[in-house]
Image (spheres, grey):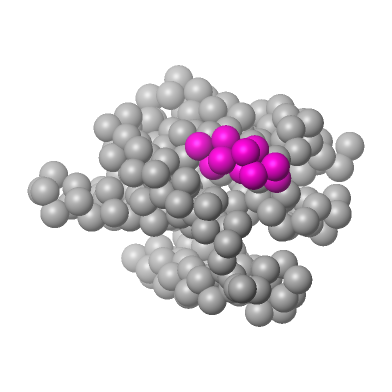
Amino acid sequence: MRLVLIGLVAGIFSSLFGVGGGIVIVPLLIVGAAFGTKEATATSLGAIVITALAGVTLYAVRGKVDVGYAALVGIPAMGGAILGTAAQQRLSSRNLAVAFAVLLAALGVWLIAG
Amino acid sequence: MSTTTIVLAMGLGVIAGVMSGLFGVGGGILFVPMLVALGLGQVEAAATSLLAVVPTAAVGTWRQARYGNLRLRPALMIGVASIVGVEIGVQIATSLPEHVLRRLFGVLLIAVAVQLAWRAVGSRASYPESR
């Protein structure tokens, strides 16, 4: 039941903002379902495949998807995802997480102001 | 599109993928501002980002499964349940004015930034120390 609720909330976030939904799934799995961080991120990625596919389908029907741009960022990102998951098994990601947080906050300010 | 723009977009794509693999977030959350910067509207950016998320998450899932971290049944349950939410989200996104959606996304980015920083600084247990 908890998993169904997590999925529902993640689905709304995902299609509303064009993100995978990991933002909601990862913390909810850790706090709400006692998952470890690696298990939560891994399981979240699995769920996101389905969530994003559903979102793409519904947006494509409405003519909102730009396949060329998606390939431009998505194909390099596949390589990046292999590096990132490998790095997660070995590295301390704390400092990186803080750096990433600063980047996201700056982008957020840009979108709100711009 | 200039060569510089293409190279920059591809480089940022790699970074987005790395963040996705590391934190389980970061694919879409970087794709959307990138696509907005490339000139797409907020809804088109969200829709296009989701298409880029599919292969990124699929590769991440495949690698994580090999590392033994994936729990398949919960992943399937969350994924299937999310489809209902996805429809609701699409309805909201296509009915909101662009500038409202863009500012909401900005707020989301800051919220995610705070959460990531809090997880990293606040709970050492969440992040394995380097050897």
Quick one: which residue is furthest to the left in this view? B2
Give the percent coordinates (x, y) of residue B45. Answer: 38, 43
Q: Position of residue A80 (x, y in %)?
A: 41, 49
Q: What is the magenta segment's predominant secondary structure?
A: helix
Please provide percent x and percent y for residue A40: 72, 50
Q: Which residues are magenta?
A: B59-69
> Looking at the image, which residue sits at the far top?
A61
In the image as oriented, which residue stretches furthest toward the right? A1
Q: Residue at 33% across / 55% down in the picture?
A: B12
Q: Is residue B88 visible?
A: no
**Residue in the image at 34% along x and 44% along y:** A76
Residue at position x 60%, y 73% from top? B130
A87 within the magenta span: no
Splitting the image into 4 quarters, where does residue A94 fall?
bottom right
Task: Give the camera-side residue of A21 and A36.
Answer: A36
Q: Residue A54: x percent and y percent?
A: 57, 27
Residue at 57%, 58% in the rendered image: A88
Left or right of B49 in this view: B118: right
Task: Depth check: give the residue in front, B38 or A42.
Answer: A42
Question: How many numbered marks are there?
Answer: 0
